[in-house]
Image (spheres, rainbow, N blue to C red):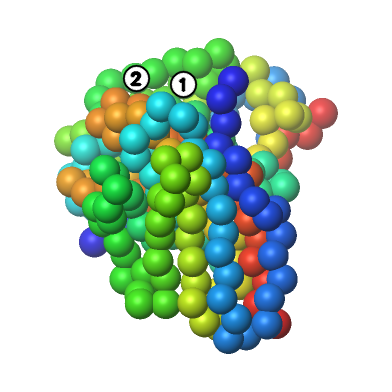
Amino acid sequence: EPEVTQTPSHQVTQMGQEVILRCVPISNHLYFYWYRQILGQKVEFLVSFYNNEISEKSEIFDDQFSVERPDGSNFTLKIRSTKLEDSAMYFCASCRDRQRNIQYFGAGTRLSVL
Amino acid sequence: KNEVEQSPQNLTAQEGEFITINCSYSVGISALHWLQQHPGGGIVSLFMLSSGKKKHGRLIATINIQEKHSSLHITASHPRDSAVYICAVRGGADGLTFGKGTHLIIQP
C-alpha cells in the first residue's frame, strides 16, 4: 500500500538553527498538510498546500515557517530559527480529494530543540 | 473556532467488550475524521464521515450532523485495539481541528 514517507525520524538541533523536515506524499495525491503535536498535547494544524501554493495556514504558522514542493515529489517544512517551543512531533499528510478522501499520515519527525 | 470534545478521556475494558468513544463539536462541519494513534506516535486514518454511518471490519463510525456528535464503536475488542483514538473535524477550509483523544486499553 502506498505510504507517506517522512525524514528524518528524529532531528536534534540547537536553538536558533534552521531545520528542514522532509516528506514524500503519495504520488497521485493533490493536497498536502503539516501538523504538529507537542508532547502530551493534541495534534494541531499548521498548513495546507494545494496547486503549488499555501491554501490555508494556522496562527501557529508564522514567518519562521515556510513550505515548499521543490520537485513534484518532496514536500518540505522549514523552520528558520528554531525555538525551544518548536520541539514536537511533526506529521506530514496527503490526500487525493479533500472532499472525499481520508488523509494519509506519515510516521512523523520528532524535532528536539536544545 | 470549533471546539472538539471527546469522551471518555481514558477507557480500560476487557477483551471482547463493545467499546464506544464519543465526539462532539461546536460549529457545523463539512467532514469528521476518526484517527488512531499508536504508542510509537504514528497516526492512521480510520474514517472520514460527512453523514450517516461507516463500517470497516470491527469498527463502526456514526455521525449526527444536527446534534454535532459522532461515535466510534469497536465490536469484539482485542488488546491490539489499544491506542489513542482521535476525532478531528474540518470546517469550510482545509485544516483539521483535533480533539485531545481517548486513551483506550483493552486487557486480555
Question: Is residue B63 visible from the viewing direction of this image?
Answer: no
Q: Residues within 10 Å of mark 2 (few under 14, many from 20)?
A: some
Question: Is residue A58 visible from the viewing direction of this image?
Answer: yes
Chain of residue at mark 1: B
- Left or right of A91? Residue B6 is left
Residue B96 screen position, x and y as percent: 35, 49
- Left or right of B14? Residue B35 is left
Residue A10 screen position, x and y as percent: 71, 60
Q: Residues within 10 Å of mark 1 (few under 14, many from 20)?
A: some
- Left or right of A106? Residue A31 is left
Q: Are marks 2 and 1 in contact (CB under 8 Å)?
A: yes
Residues B59 and B11: in front is B59
Name the quadrant of the C terminus of chain B. top right
Looking at the image, which residue is at 30% across and 61% down?
Answer: A57
Q: Quadrant of residue B28?
A: top left
Of the residues shown, which amino acid type is indicated by label 1?
Ile
Looking at the image, which residue is at 52% across and 82% down?
Answer: A81
Q: Earlier in the sequence, mark 2 or mark 1?
A: 2
Name the quadrant of the N terminus of chain B. bottom left
Looking at the image, which residue is at 40% across and 66% down?
Answer: A66
Label 2 SS: strand
Residue A91 screen position, x and y as percent: 53, 52
Q: Residue B53, labelled with which disc?
A: 2
Chain of residue at mark 2: B
Label 1 SS: strand
Q: Residue B60, labelled with which disc?
A: 1
